[in-house]
Image (cartoon, rainbow, N blue to C red):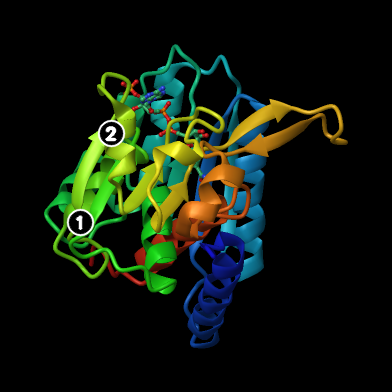
Amino acid sequence: MYQLLNGKELSNIIKEEIKQEVSEMVSIGKRAPHLAAILVGSDGASETYVGHKVKMCDAVGFKSTLVRMDSDVSEEELLNKIAELNQQEDLDGFIVQLPLPKHINVQKVTQAIDHRKDVDGFHPVNVGRMAQNLPAYLPATPFGIIQLLERNGVETSGKECVILGRSNIVGSPMSILLTRNAKVGNCTVTVCHSRTKDLKFHTQRADILIVALGQAEFVKGDMVKEGVVVVDVGITRLEDSTKKRGYRLAGDVLFSEVAPKSSFITPVPGGVGPMTVISLLKNTLASAKGEIYA
Ligand code: NDP
């Protein structure tokens, strides 16, 4: 029988921990942590994610600022706004919600953010420090997964870990974190992508399988071995006329086939998603406390 890696439940626990810390900070006269988000355009999913981040800030007692920019904003205007936020003294961290419109260079934007305020952990300085096991803001989704494994007592040391997907925000940093000599780490990691030959060969030998492809229900029961730990990062909207909103959310893993063979598995929704948001708040709190960069 599998155990659910319940991100909804764990994120609520961590939310209470953060809230407690914030109220202690405020009670001794410090200001509450402050997170800002820049949202370019009005993409439906991005609106939802940013809205959720703002709501979570309110819930833990953070100050939050939402900066909206039109989808036709120039790269220069966006970079100017970033430069402004970099200088804002009462701001502990900020994010630029991805994806950005095609005319804006994401690399340029990522690198324009002061790494000391880069609570999304995408700046090369933070990625480099993470790789060297130095204090850094960890990218929110991989950080959330690490906490999900740690707090559920999942042993990682010496395990074969297979990661499907090599994006800068999930697959690649996840591979760095699980390779490190750290409490949650010490795995032997294989990263697979669209050029990988015989994906099934790799997935079938995984003790820990992390899936971040963006391909709904891609991983089937015959692709995994008994006892595998499965972390499903994927979120895809599939049309479903039986649902009021007209769609359902699907992960990258076919839960009904894979769960019975698993020892631990994340649900979608309610697994990695809530952990991602809470990790962003953890990074912001760490920034406010000067824990990463004094
Ligand atoms: P990207 O599209 O940036 O990367 C997908 C990766 O999967 C790429 O490395 C790609 O390979 C690989 N890939 C795609 N299809 C295949 C295939 N058929 N076989 C082998 N490899 C394949 O995605 P992200 O990492 O940004 O996101 C992945 C999923 O996770 C999405 O559904 C996204 O919505 C979700 N997500 C969820 C979050 C959460 O909080 N729960 C946070 C972030 C993302 P190649 O590099 O060769 O193209």
Q: Name the quadrant where ligand 1 sits.
A: top left
Give the mark nearer the N terminus: 2 vs 1. Answer: 1
Q: Quadrant of residue 62?
A: bottom right
In the image shown, does 181 or 293 lie closer to the viewer? Answer: 181
In the rendered structure, the answer to whether residue 19 lies left or right of residue 242 reads left
Q: Which residue is mark 1?
A: 187
- Residue at the (45%, 38%) spot, across then down: 222
Q: Residues within 10 Å of mark 1 (few under 14, many from 20)?
A: many
- Residue at the (50%, 18%) spot, across then down: 101
Position of residue 135 measured from the top left corner of the image (x, y, whole percent): 21, 62
Identify which amino acid the numbered label 2 is placed on. Answer: Phe
Helix, strand or loop under label 2: helix
In the rendered structure, the answer to whether residue 180 lies left or right of residue 102 reads left
Q: Quadrant of residue 199?
A: top left
In the image shown, does 95 or 198 lie closer to the viewer? Answer: 198
Position of residue 283 measured from the top left corner of the image (x, y, whole percent): 39, 60
Helix, strand or loop under label 1: loop
Q: Which residue is mark 2?
A: 201
Q: Do we see residue 282 in this rendering?
A: yes
- Residue at the (52%, 39%) spot, across then down: 253
The vertical placement of 207 against 49, above or below, is below
Identify which amino acid the numbered label 1 is placed on. Answer: Cys
Q: Residues within 10 Å of mark 2 (few under 14, many from 20)?
A: few
Q: Quadrant of the N terminus?
A: bottom right
Q: Quadrant of residue 41?
A: top right
Q: Quadrant of the C terminus?
A: bottom left
In the rendered structure, the answer to whether residue 15 lies left or right of residue 280 reads right
In the image shown, does 174 or 37 lie closer to the viewer? Answer: 174
The vertical placement of 83 against 207, above or below, is above
